[in-house]
Amino acid sequence: MSIEIQKQQYAGIVKILNLGSGDKMISLGGEEIYPFYTFEGKMPFAPRIAIQVVDCNPEEWADAVKEPYADVLHDPVLWAKKAQDVYNADMIHLWLKSTDPNGLNRSAEDAALTAKAVADAVTVPLIVWGTANSEKDAEVLKAVAAACQGQQIIIGPVDEANHKQLGAQALANNLTLVANTPIDINLAKQLNILLSNIGVPIEKIIIDPTTGGLGYGIEYTYSVMERIRQAAITQNDEKLQCPFLCNLSEEVWKTKEAKQESGDLMGDARKRGILMEAITASTLLNAGADILVMRHPDAIAQVRRYIADLGGFAAPKFAVKTAAAKSEAAAPSGSISPAQSTVATSLKAGSLCKIVQIMDMPMELAPGYAIALIKSVDHEDVSDGLVLSTHAEAGKNELSAGEPARTAAPEAAVPKEDKPEFKPAASWLPLSAETPASAPVVPESKHDWRGRLSDKEDMLQQARTDQRYWYSESHGSEKRKKPA
């Protein structure tokens, strides 16, 4: 008997927004379902990634995120071209940070020249971003709109204080606006209504709900984005049927966790920052993000794979070729193949080798793995080589004893040591620094609250009142001694 799964009924659809022109034009929106609920309806366009470019050298950035752009940080035009040509940016997000009145306070004219130069250098859609200073942004983005007339750029952030000035520029120059409000569904709708009242079509508005980074308020952003998307597609609220832009890069990479150096406690700084950005982006995708503003190419690669896998979209351009694809691209028949090395077949348990070089695999290929360049070593050079073994301890013993290397069949390798089957103890007690690992574990004191109580009703009372936290191994987060 077949089972018919009931599907959610949707009343509205997100407006389709076309950005850019020619073969680089991209489309956003069109969702008639919750994010990636493709089993219930259509999600015609994949979310897009805009790589952030800054108009001045970001010396305060973490080293991990400066490294991919180290050769172009001084020039926003070269930076934008590298983001487009090398890292396949869907869009460029040009942050005019130097115009901040509390910073370099560069003029609107200088900013317009920079924006024009970047717009002329790239073919993908361009987002020109201010500094969230309403008065200065109105001046700067007005100059940018005039300089980039006819190039269909996107400008933002637009807020309630400057929506009239920038709304007029959008109408005069056929621009798309990014409407920014501070994490509130009612304020987001109100700003869209204000822009509509001065003539800006809802199809020319992108909602920026204000984004929090991982561990820094992202749950608030997620909740508001959920409510906006619910109102748009289940309640058919036309004033909220706009694509989302999430400007997450600055929110992630300015945190102390992203900037803290590598160490035993926090691990590798580069990997930490990349994962923070990728996880933040993936979380916002599930809330409905259509444009993600990101920085690090490795984080972008991970998020692109996630989009492709979850939404059923085309695989990203950097995808690794499969073995079948590689064989199809092999040399044509009749060509002479070079002789293959026999080193790999000779490296069996007990043979001698030397590691020449080790390098980490790229994150998009095999995260957490490394590849090694291994050289076969003669038996005479036993002091300069490593003995391959299926058992690490056996290899160390052989080297320390100075025994000659031997080439043995795999079945002659040292057998694995038989370990007794693990059996959990009746109750658990943390080992103190003075307790040897082999010492018997004996429940005592408040660590074993179950052992202290024999009556069933008493145990249930402990659970009902949360007194068990006091008797837990960590004494409870609040060290409760009395009923909660």
Image (cartoon, rainbow, N blue to C red):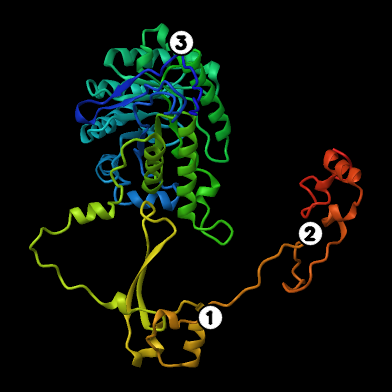
- For the residue marked with disc 3, what is the amino acid? Ile
- For the residue marked with disc 1, what is the amino acid? Glu
Mark with earlier residue (1, 3): 3
- Cα distance between the residues tagged 3 and 2: 62 Å
Left or right relative to 353: residue 323: left
Left or right relative to 215: residue 24: left
Q: Position of residue 298 (x, y in %)?
A: 38, 48
Q: Position of residue 436 (x, y in %)?
A: 74, 74
| Image depth: mark 3 or mark 2 in front | 2
- For the residue marked with disc 2, what is the amino acid? Ser
Left or right relative to 244: residue 151: left
Res 93 quadrant in image? top left
Residue marked by disc 3: 193
Q: Secondary structure at mark 3?
A: helix
| Image depth: mark 1 or mark 3 in front | 1
Is residue 144 at all visible to an observer of this figure?
Answer: yes
The 10 Å Cα crowd at callout 3, few under 14, some 14 to 19, many 20 or more, is some
Residue marked by disc 2: 427
Q: Secondary structure at mark 1?
A: helix
Location of the C terminus by quadrant is top right
Is residue 253 at all visible to an observer of this figure?
Answer: no
Of 343 and 266, nearer the camera is 343
Mark linked to residue 470: none
Res 313 quadrant in image? top left
Residue marked by disc 1: 393
Res 349 quadrant in image? bottom left
